[in-house]
Amino acid sequence: MKFGVVQMSVADGSAETNLVVARRLICDAPAADLYLLPELWSSGYSRERWALIADQETPDVMGKLAGVARERKVWLCGSMIARGKDGGLANQFFLLERTGKLVGTYDKTHLFRPMREHEYLTAGVTMAIFDVEGYRVAPAICYDLRFPALFLKCAEKGVDVFLVPAQWPHPRCRPLRVLSQARAIECQCYLALSNRLGSDSGGTKFCGGSRIIDPIGTETAFETEMEGTVVTEIDRQLLLETRHALPVMQDRNPAVDSFC
């Protein structure tokens, strides 16, 4: 099965513009079964408009994106501003299957204070694991990468691929790469990272570097800041061989390796 990560610039507060770009990049991309869009790809950090976007624009964009999934017969995912289960605003991961049906969602559990997410959003309290044609996949969003317990809990439950939409800025490009590799290697999973390009309306510049990392840390990645899509075959045999050769999850010591 092939997974693709879409790297794109985001026009803050302009859902229609962003949808046009996302559709073009997906339609022009190398063939894949699943495409991952960046964090908040439809809106960016237009915080003052988030409530309006969640109520009026996100449902419409989701419907149109579902049409792309049906048309292309692919899985689509990423994160958008939406209403969480309690009615509050959430930075919400979504997963659409090939028919356009919404499989499920995940609300970002670690809110990023430098971008004032904690002032506007409600943090999620649970992880999520989905089945994608026999692969167990788990979402995490951007800042979640700095919290390994979330990933290890998912790995303990047999996750094969992490899907990580992000808006990770300069000058922290190196930590993004190192943390992404670390999460993949320590969990013996694939990790697909889709990161935003360009600058937001406040002048924050985002560093791209979208990549797919295999369970031993090998990367397929953008080395330049350009729009496009990277695609990698998810190799089930490599997952099995890596875990058999080094049974990390079996060798945990419960006395010291608690995931709390």
Image (tube, grey):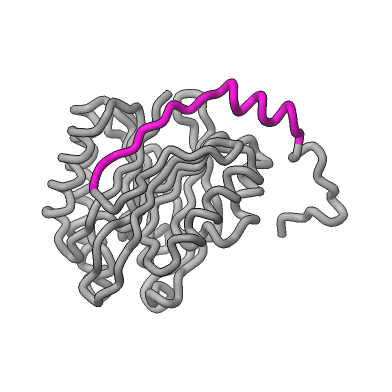
| Span colored in magenta | 227-247
Across and down, in percent, residue 186 comes to 66, 46
In percent of the image, x 21 and y 73: which residue is there?
201
Question: Can residue 221 be found in the magenta stretch?
Answer: no
Question: Can residue 228 be found in the magenta stretch?
Answer: yes
Q: Is residue 222 left or right of residue 251?
A: left
Across and down, in percent, residue 235 comes to 52, 24
Across and down, in percent, residue 42 comes to 23, 55
The quarter of the rendered structure image containing the C terminus is bottom right
Question: Is 37 placed above or below 101 here?
Answer: below
Question: Is 162 placed above or below 71 here?
Answer: below
**Quadrant of residue 258 in the image?**
bottom right
**Quadrant of residue 222 in the image?**
top left
The quarter of the rendered structure image containing the N terminus is top left
Q: Is residue 19 left or right of residue 255?
A: left
**Quadrant of residue 246 in the image?**
top right
